[in-house]
Image (cartoon, rainbow, N blue to C red):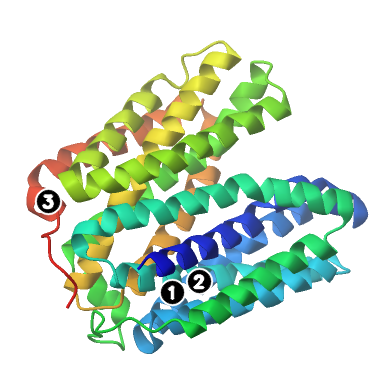
Amino acid sequence: MRRLLLLTGAVVLVDTMFFSAITPLLPTYAERFDLSKAAAGVLSGSYAAGAVVGTLPSGWLAVRAGSRRTLLLGLSLMAVSSVGFAFAGSVVLLDVMRFVDGIGGACAWAGGMGWLVSTTPAAERGATIGKAMSAALAGVLLGPVLGAVAQAAGPEVPFSVVGLFAALLAVVALRMPAAAGGTGSVAVERPYLTAWHEARVRLGAWLVLVPALVFGTVEVLAPLALDGLGASGVAIGAVFLVAAGIEGVAQVFAGRATDRLGRGAPIRLGLGGTLAFLLVVTVPEAAWLLAAVVVAGCVLSGIVNTPAMTLLSDGVEGAGLEHGLGFAIVNLVWGGGQVVGAVAGAALAGATSDAVPYMLLAAVCGGTLLALRGRAGQLAPAPVRELA
């Protein structure tokens, strides 16, 4: 299982690096191709669009063809699109390559994480997911570094190396044996409907959605608030880099707590902390204090993700479906939540004040905490057993 964990960690690292590498490159491409703000937004968001489009097919493919084949398809698309992005000579081709990479990333996440979790005993599932999520956050941190190198030296070599690495990971995956046994494949013609009948899938999806809504709102409103208090662009970027770094470490501990204490304890801690953050985030009147509050809020809301994904995986297994389907649902819910949080949260704040979307999200967190009181059985630790 260690080899598969390393492989999956490398896959999500490469995927999130490519996703976040566009940040320092966007001004360069905007100047080179004379892009409007709308066109620059399309370039930045084309990856996410591809990921959303690829989410449902990747889950269906995981059920029909298996997680390993889904991973291999994802890595192949990532390799081709990375090299294509490296040598793209027009903004249309850049958009297309990022869109294709988003589809590949959706397949790689569903296939890689599904394959990994299917080989992990249920009692160790939280720790395994936490470690993989740490690799994803490391990719978020390293992506801007990759983009900075591409900005200074040209995109050809850095992104070609990324594409080559994705191809090598596909070769490694191809040489590894597929998981023995598996979770089965019930009602494969309508796998999402089958999964949605399982209560733990519905609850896990909701618990993934809540922090996604929070983060989508915070990533728009917090930088503007920090700027209003005099923080520089570098300082604002550092706030979110520090938050991602701390969250990467916190995910490992959240995973261990998920296995030892049950899914409920870290979920309640994360939701309670997020609720407190949302209630005080508009109070600080100094940039340094707001920065500290934002870092704490991002980390606390992120803690919910690992036990929520673990709970969703429990439900997918209970429905007799491939785990890749569960991570396809995660991708869809997380991506959709971030988009809704960013767009709706910013629009509501613009029409009223920042406090209004934050208070609405606080009500969502509080209501979720209350709703969890009657779900102890669903949130209990998984029984200690070995895979068949």
Instruction: Establish if 269 lies above or below 97.
Output: above
Assign a secondary structure to mark 2.
helix
Q: Which residue is label 3 attached to?
A: 380
Q: Which residue is mark 1?
A: 111
Q: How far separated are the C-alphas under marks 2 and 3?
A: 29 Å
At 50% from the left and 13% from the top, the residue drawn is: 284
Above or below, 299 relative to 257: above
Task: Determine the CA span between mark 2 and mark 1.
Answer: 5 Å
Drawn side of residue 145 relative to residue 342, left or right: right
Callout count = 3
Picture coordinates of residue 262, whole percent (x, y): 17, 48
Q: Secondary structure at mark 3?
A: loop
Residue 168, position as x, y percentages in the image? 62, 75
The amino acid sitting under disc 2 is Ala
Residue that protrudes farthest toward the top in the picture: 285
Q: Residue at x 43, y 68 (%)?
A: 3
| Identity of the residue drawn at 31% across and 43% down | 254
Residue of label 2: 108
Q: Residue at x 42, y 35 (%)?
A: 299
Give the Cα distance between marks 3 and 1.
Answer: 26 Å
Q: Earlier in the sequence, mark 3 or mark 1?
A: 1
301 left or right of 367 in image:
right
Q: Amino acid at mark 1?
A: Gly
Q: What amino acid is at disc 3? A: Ala
Could you tell me residue 292's position as x and y percent?
A: 50, 21
Contact flag, marks 2 and 1 (Cβ < 8 Å) = yes
Label 1 secondary element: helix
Q: Is residue 338 visible?
A: yes
Other-residue count near label 1 (Cα within 10 Å), few / some / many at <14 / 14–19 / ≥20:
many
